[in-house]
Image (cartoon, grey):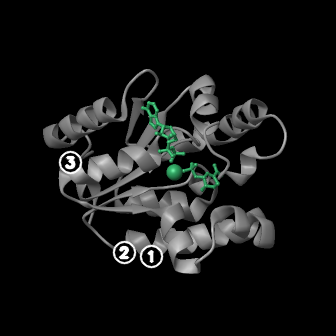
């Protein structure tokens, strides 16, 4: 099942992947899966607990397994976590199974949006802005590598972003 039947959202923390994914799925009449929430539901523990007990690599192993499992399902919008693009296998999976949308967001906006809660372990140590800048330098080439389409989210409501995405999908612009 390829392209508009399975849509993956990628991008940095605070890009709005989880928020936009749910709205996009509702608009398209597709199921919605957020990889982080699926991991939490399945394991019965939260993401900070997994990072504390198993380290980032332990979390990445769980993330890759969940990506594989969810990707077997069609008819869904899948919101990934900001680091899901780090592993080659995850990138190949997304590129082969679906349409990948990169939600582009400035560092300033990432900082603003992620300062509202403390559920992201990678931002709990050091200066969040410096961390987000470093992560973007490392990851943006990977977001661009997997993306069929990039869409800006700064100064735009989640609803406006979803409307643009729905229009593109209906026009077939995402069916490359
Ligand atoms: N386009 C947007 N404009 C303003 N705030 C947004 C936008 N998209 C998401 N948010 C807010 O930013 C925060 C992080 O969004 P979230 O969907 O969790 O991002 P991600 O899953 O990419 O880390 C939430 O409080 C959400 O309400
Ligand atoms: O960027 C990252 O490495 C992470 C992003 C988080 O998801 P969001 O991008 O939805 O915040 C979550 O997967 C975990 O805290 C690690
Ligand atoms: Mg999220």
Residue 141's x, y, as percent? 60, 38
Single out the residue that lies furthest toward the left. Answer: 171
- Residue 69's label in the rendered image is 1
Tag 3 near tag 1, CB within 8 Å: no
Q: Residue visible at 72% across and 71% down?
A: 58
Residue 90's x, y, as percent? 54, 62
Residue 143 is left or right of residue 75, and the answer is right
Q: Nearer the viewer, residue 29 or 85?
A: 29
Q: Residue visible at 37% across and 44% down?
A: 20
What secondary structure is marked by label 2?
Answer: loop
What secondary structure is marked by label 3?
Answer: helix
Residue 90 is left or right of residue 61, and the answer is left
Give the vertical position of 112 relative to 120 (above or below): above
Residue 63: quadrant of the picture: bottom right
Residue under pointer 2: 72
Single out the residue that lies furthest toward the bottom. Answer: 43
Q: Residue visible at 45% across and 46% down?
A: 17
The 10 Å Cα crowd at callout 2, few under 14, some 14 to 19, many 20 or more, is few
Residue under pointer 3: 27
Circle 3 or circle 1, nearest the eye: 3
- Residue 92's label in the rendered image is none
Residue 42 is left or right of residue 129, and the answer is left
Residue 134 is left or right of residue 66, and the answer is right
**On the rendered image, what quadrant is the C terminus found in?**
top left
Residue 104's x, y, as percent? 49, 32
Tag 1 near tag 2, CB within 8 Å: yes
Q: Measure how far apart labels 3 and 1 are at the Cα level.
A: 24 Å
Q: Nearer the viewer, residue 49 or 24?
A: 49
Q: Residue visible at 83% across and 45% down?
A: 125
The 10 Å Cα crowd at callout 3, few under 14, some 14 to 19, many 20 or more, is few
């Amino acid at each position: 099942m390829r392209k508009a039947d399975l849509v993956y959202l990628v991008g940095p923390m605070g890009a709005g992947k989880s928020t936009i994914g749910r709205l996009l799925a509702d608009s398209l009449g597709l199921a919605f899966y957020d990889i982080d929430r699926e991991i939490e539901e399945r394991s019965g523990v939260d993401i900070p607990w997994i990072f504390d007990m198993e380290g980032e690599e332990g979390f990445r192993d769980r993330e890759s397994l969940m990506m594989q499992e969810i990707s077997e399902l069609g008819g869904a919008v899948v919101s990934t976590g900001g680091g899901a693009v780090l592993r080659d296998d995850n990138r190949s999976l997304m590129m082969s199974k679906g349409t990948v949308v990169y939600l582009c967001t400035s560092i300033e906006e990432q900082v603003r949006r992620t300062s509202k809660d403390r559920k992201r372990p990678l931002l709990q140590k050091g200066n969040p802005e410096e961390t987000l800048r470093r992560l973007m330098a490392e990851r943006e080439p990977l977001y661009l590598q997997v993306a069929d389409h990039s869409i800006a989210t700064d100064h735009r409501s989640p609803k406006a972003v979803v409307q643009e995405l729905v229009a593109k999908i209906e026009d077939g612009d995402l069916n490359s």
